[in-house]
Image (cartoon, rainbow, N blue to C red):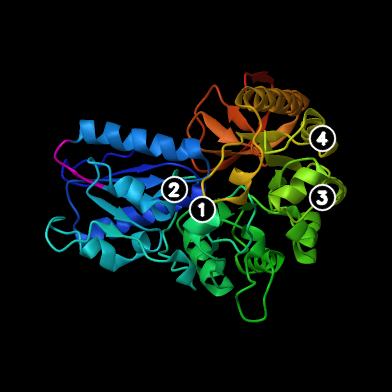
């Protein structure tokens, strides 16, 4: 949570993904321009039932700590279930994912949130056809900037409610993206991360339907001073030829990809309504490593999806080794009302918890093996603070002496401490 210096300035707290964090920074700017005061803004997540429950907890906590402030709830949970939050006595205003990015919304709140302000401002997200991009020149640290290039999702995975929080897929035109990255580089950022809800669908709604690989190649060509370009989560089945070429030939494209795999069993993947099978995932990982031998992978995997047997779960566990995954994000399945998976036969909660723990343990072993293999090697490390930075493969590195924050330094790895390398 960020608390500005002025006691009257809004307080913002973010739950969930990097895209939410990006949008929180945009909201800070919009609220400041509108002169909004004495408000607390909670940007919620809806990816799991637990995320929605935690949003309620956070709202109650923030109300206790800020008894006189106006409580404003937004984000995916607010978009998908506005009544849940408007019914909370702690909440003064609920605004949707489209409304939160519009200057008019914030102008209507200032200087007084009472009066004509509608308590619920959530329109049909499916009617939105453009990603308004309130452009912000970096956030989070002085080292790495995040650029939203896409929003929404056209797919309907049976476990996922996010399309109903984000709407259909919309792309930011390449020229707009390139110009923003140029500004970020001019401001001294050495690494830019492309973010979106379904990043590999970028371009499908634009003239000529360019692909994500086209955007990556264009950025690297037109912004030659950008030292590092990183891609956030991708759907490997949708990766295009130009992106594979960039992986093979562009050293400024970081050798770390986070894959939206979700499971390792073909029948479960079909029941999830995913677009790939396990062999597709394995082939992609092998090909990407052939083109870029030092490539590392993160992955999202769900444990305990409805109808998952022990044998099906074992296929997910094997995928950690078969795709040589390094960084796992493990999600214990929780039913989301309104999704097809919520109506399927559910797995016992204790089994879900145990399987998630086994997946996390496999992920921890894989990460430790990767870290141990780095000892004695020299890495280029982007410093996020005077004492901590990240390698090109996204491993954290601790330094004993101060380094220039926001700069890339060369360092020889001397050891491992917990989940971090030592230099």
Q: Disc 3 vs disc 1: which is toward the camera?
A: 3
Element under label 2?
Answer: helix
Residue corresponding to mark 1: 146
Distance between the Cα atoms at labels 1 and 4? 34 Å
Residue corresponding to mark 3: 277
Q: Disc 1 vs disc 2: which is toward the camera?
A: 2
Residue 161 image position (x, y, % from top left) = 54, 51
* Quarter of the view holding residue 32: bottom left
Magenta range is: 67-71
Tell me which label, 1 or 2, sits earlier in the chain.
2
Residue 403 image position (x, y, % from top left) = 52, 33
Q: Disc 1 vs disc 4: which is toward the camera?
A: 4
Tell me which label, 3 or 4, sits earlier in the chain.
3
Element under label 3?
Answer: loop
Residue corresponding to mark 2: 21
Can see residue 232? no
75 or 176: which is nearer to us?
75
Tell me which label, 1 or 4, sits earlier in the chain.
1
Residue 106 image position (x, y, % from top left) = 25, 61
Q: Disc 4 vs disc 2: which is toward the camera?
A: 4
Can see residue 203? yes
Residue corresponding to mark 4: 315
Q: Residue at x 22, y 61 (%)?
A: 118
296 or 125: which is nearer to us?
125
Q: Residue at x 67, y 81 (%)?
A: 208
Q: How many marks?
A: 4
């Amino acid at each position: 949570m960020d608390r500005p210096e002025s006691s009257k300035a809004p307080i913002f707290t973010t739950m969930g993904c990097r895209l939410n964090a990006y949008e929180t920074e945009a909201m800070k700017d919009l609220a400041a321009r509108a002169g909004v005061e004495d408000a607390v803004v909670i940007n919620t997540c809806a990816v799991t039932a637990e995320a929605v429950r935690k949003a309620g907890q956070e709202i109650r906590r923030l109300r206790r700590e800020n008894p006189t402030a106006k409580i404003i709830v937004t984000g995916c949970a607010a978009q998908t279930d506005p009544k849940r939050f408007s019914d909370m006595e702690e909440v003064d205003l609920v605004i949707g994912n489209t409304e939160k990015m519009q200057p008019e919304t914030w102008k209507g709140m200032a200087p007084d949130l009472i009066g004509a302000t509608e308590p619920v401002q959530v329109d049909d997200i499916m009617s939105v056809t453009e990603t308004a991009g309130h452009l912000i020149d970096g956030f989070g640290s002085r080292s790495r900037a995040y650029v939203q290039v896409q929003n929404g999702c056209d797919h309907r995975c049976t476990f996922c409610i996010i399309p109903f929080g984000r709407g259909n897929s919309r792309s930011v035109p390449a020229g707009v993206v390139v110009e923003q990255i140029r500004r970020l580089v001019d401001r001294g950022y050495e690494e830019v991360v492309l973010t979106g809800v379904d990043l590999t669908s970028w371009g499908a709604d634009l003239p000529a339907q360019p692909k994500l690989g086209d955007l990556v190649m264009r950025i690297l060509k037109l912004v030659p001073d950008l030292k590092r370009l990183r891609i956030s989560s991708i759907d490997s089945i949708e990766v295009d030829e130009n992106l594979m070429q960039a992986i093979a030939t562009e050293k400024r494209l970081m050798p770390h990809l986070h894959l939206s795999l979700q499971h390792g069993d073909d029948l479960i993947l079909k029941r999830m309504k995913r677009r790939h099978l396990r062999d597709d995932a394995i082939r992609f990982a092998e090909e990407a490593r052939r083109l870029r031998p030092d490539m590392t992978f993160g992955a999202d995997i769900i444990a305990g999806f409805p109808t998952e047997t022990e044998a099906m779960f074992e296929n997910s566990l094997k995928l950690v080794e078969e795709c040589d995954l390094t960084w796992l994000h493990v999600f214990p399945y929780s039913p989301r009302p309104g999704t097809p998976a919520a109506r399927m036969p559910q797995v016992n909660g204790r089994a879900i918890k145990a399987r998630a723990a086994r997946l996390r343990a496999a992920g921890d072993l894989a990460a430790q093996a990767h870290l141990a293999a780095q000892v004695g090697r020299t890495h280029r490390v982007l410093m996020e603070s005077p004492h901590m930075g990240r390698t090109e493969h996204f491993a954290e590195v601790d330094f004993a002496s101060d380094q220039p924050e926001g700069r890339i330094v060369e360092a020889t790895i001397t050891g491992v401490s917990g989940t971090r390398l030592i230099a």
